[in-house]
C-alpha cells in the first residue's frame, strides 16, 4: 500500500548480543531500531508507516547494511558513535530531546533532570522521560544513557537488564564473557 509520494521503506532483523532487533530504513535514513520483543514495537512500526506512507517491506537497504556493521562494531567495543543517517520523526519537543541524547558522550550518563535542563525545559523530567521512551532508534540514539538523579537506572523500553548491559559495555567494565553470555 504505497501512495505515489511514498518512499520505499525496508525492514530487516538484526541479531545482537542483547537479542534480535527490528530495523527499518527509507532513503531518508534509519527510522526504527527496536528490540524485537518490545511491547511498543507494533505502535512504533505503525508510526513509521504513517510517516512514510508505506508499509515496511522485508528486504535489504544500504542503510540497513551499514547499520548492521556499525552495531556489530559497537557491541564488539570498536565503535563509540554511529554514522548511519537517521530519519527522526516526532514532535518538535521529542526531536529536540533525541538530538540532546545524541550529545551524551559514550560511557557517560545524565539524569532526567539534567536532560530536561539541556532541552530548555527545567522541571520537565517527566516530559523528557516520555520523549525518551518514544525514541524509535534504540542504542543509536542512546536513551539508555539517561538515569535517575539517585543513580538508579529507571525505565528502559528494551528492559532494565539490557540498559544495564549497555552501560556496562560503554563504561568498559565488562569482564570477558559476562556482558552477553
Image: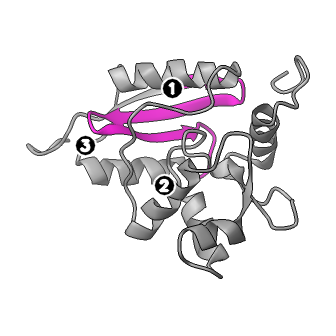
Mark before the other along the chain sequence, 3 or 1: 1
Residue wearing tag 2: 99
- Tell me if residue 146 is in the magenta stretch: no
C-alpha span from label 3 to label 1? 18 Å
C-alpha span from label 2 to label 1? 25 Å
**Mark 3 Cα within 10 Å, few/some/many (few <14, many 20+)?**
many
> Overall secondary structure of the magenta stretch?
strand
Residue wearing tag 1: 13
Residue range (magenta): 14-40
Can residue 61 be seen at all in this image of the molecule?
no
User: For the point 53% across and 53% down, which residue is it?
Assistant: 135
Left or right relative to 181: residue 141? left
Residue 48 spot, x, y in % from top left: 36, 48
User: For the point 42% across and 47% down, which residue is it?
Assistant: 45
**Mark 1 Cα within 10 Å, few/some/many (few <14, many 20+)?**
some
User: For the point 57% across and 53% down, which residue is it?
Assistant: 101
Residue 99 spot, x, y in % from top left: 48, 55
127, above or below 55, in the image: below
Residue 47 spot, x, y in % from top left: 38, 54
Residue wearing tag 3: 54
Circles 2 and 3, Cβ within 8 Å, touching? The answer is no
Residue 13 spot, x, y in % from top left: 51, 26
SS of the residue at dot 2? Answer: helix
Amino acid at each position: 500500500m504505497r501512495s505515489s509520494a511514498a518512499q520505499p521503506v525496508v525492514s530487516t532483523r538484526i541479531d545482537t548480543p542483547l537479542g534480535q532487533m527490528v530495523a527499518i530504513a527509507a532513503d531518508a535514513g534509519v527510522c526504527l531500531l527496536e528490540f524485537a520483543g518490545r511491547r511498543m514495537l507494533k505502535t512504533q512500526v505503525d508510526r513509521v508507516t504513517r510517516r512514510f506512507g508505506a508499509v515496511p517491506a522485508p528486504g535489504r537497504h544500504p542503510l540497513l547494511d551499514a547499520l548492521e556493521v556499525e552495531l556489530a562494531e559497537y557491541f564488539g567495543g570498536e565503535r563509540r558513535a554511529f554514522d548511519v543517517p537517521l530519519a527522526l520523526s516526532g514532535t518538535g519537543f521529542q526531536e529536540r530531546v533525541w538530538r540532546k541524547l545524541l550529545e551524551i558522550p559514550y560511557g557517560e550518563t545524565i539524569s532526567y533532570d539534567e536532560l530536561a535542563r539541556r532541552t530548555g525545559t527545567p522541571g520537565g523530567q517527566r516530559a523528557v522521560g516520555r520523549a525518551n521512551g518514544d525514541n524509535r532508534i534504540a542504542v543509536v540514539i542512546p536513551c539508555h544513557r539517561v538515569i535517575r538523579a539517585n543513580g538508579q537506572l529507571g525505565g528502559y523500553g528494551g528492559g532494565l537488564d539490557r540498559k544495564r548491559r549497555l552501560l556496562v559495555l560503554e563504561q568498559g567494565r565488562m569482564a570477558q564473557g559476562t556482558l552477553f553470555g
